[in-house]
Image (spheres, rainbow, N blue to C red):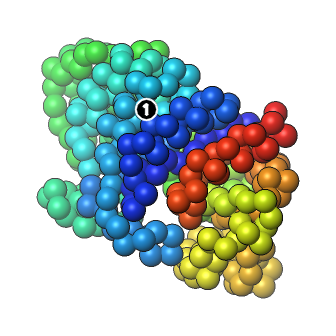
Amino acid sequence: MKFGLLLPHFGEYASGDRILRGSQLAEELGFDSVWVRDHLVFEPHGEMESPNREFYDALTTLTAIGAVTSRIQLGTGSLIPFRHPLTTALQLGTMTQLVGDRLILGFGAGTYQHEFDAIGWGDRDRVSLVRSNAEILRRVAVENDVAYSDENFTFSGVTIEPKPVGGPVPFWYCGATPRSARLAAEWADGWMPGRISLGGIAQRVESMRSIVAQNGRPLPTVAVIPPTSVESTREEALKDVNVPGLLAWANKAKFAVKPASGRFETVEDLEGQLIVGSPADIVDEVKKFEAAGVEHLVFDFRFKFHRWFEQIELLGTEVLPALR
């Protein structure tokens, strides 16, 4: 199992120092990856974030991290398709030439219509945009004089250089719905939901196993990015977590696999959608993710960015050694 961290590149605690020194510390302590989100016109999630609209560009941030680290993988969770895929292809090829073969490209359809309205793409189907990106990025990574046409993009005679070091960058589909898992099994290299219950993960993984058994593709890498808070005790760790907000969000999620009561009512009901407690508690929770089929777990410290370095230290010195 691999372990990563979502970086503080958005909101009130976004800073170059936290991002760069935190990534270096994560690499020193044995984390496998660091991750960024993506927005063009950022609107914070009220249940998890302050109203601060600061948001550092995803690929620029990962490039800077790559320049000050040597091993740690650099992931997007998720990139949103408001860029032309040829622009993204040039960025990815350039990044791998500068920092090596370390990228994971998580791609999702996005939540906010206004980001696509702002660039004149408001009438496009966002899931089809993700599929277009997957096809185009794979082809221009290995081919020259590429011709392509679909409902979103048309071009011919296109060669993008430099090519990505190591070949096409792994392309993961990001989303928690049954459809997202199905699409990942059909044409992506990985599947990465954000907040999703353990029951939801197990259900989606079983669905993907059935699909790949029929289409002959490898099972996509299963990853997840749950909100996390670790302190010396569970009580202390819970102090910074907006449990009512998470419960309200979970109860509104259309495809959530709900507890036996039919509603998310307690912090225990959020199993899989929140990792909280002492280092020993975190170890126990991570093992549940592993049992559900998760291969790459990314800790989301959005509630704890004010204690960013302390959280990295606690996980790196007291949790990761117990899991390896």
Three-letter amino acid code at the position of disc 1: Ile
Q: Quadrant of residue 281?
A: bottom right
Q: Position of residue 194 (x, y in %)?
A: 56, 57
In what element is the residue under mark 1? helix
Task: Tell me if 291 is positioned left or right of 307 in this view.
Answer: right
| Residue at 22 percent of width and 40 percent of height | 84
Left or right, residue 163 beside residue 145? right
Q: In which quadrant is the C terminus drawn?
A: top right
Does the rendering let one see residue 73? yes
Residue position marked by numbered label 1 in the rendering: 65
Quadrant hosting residue 29: top right
Left or right of 241, for residue 167: left
Above or below, comparing residue 3 to residue 242 in the picture: above
Q: Position of residue 21 (x, y in %)?
A: 49, 37
Residue at position x 71%, y 66% from top? 237
Q: Residue at x 41, y 20 (%)?
A: 99
Residue 112 placed where, x, y %? 33, 66
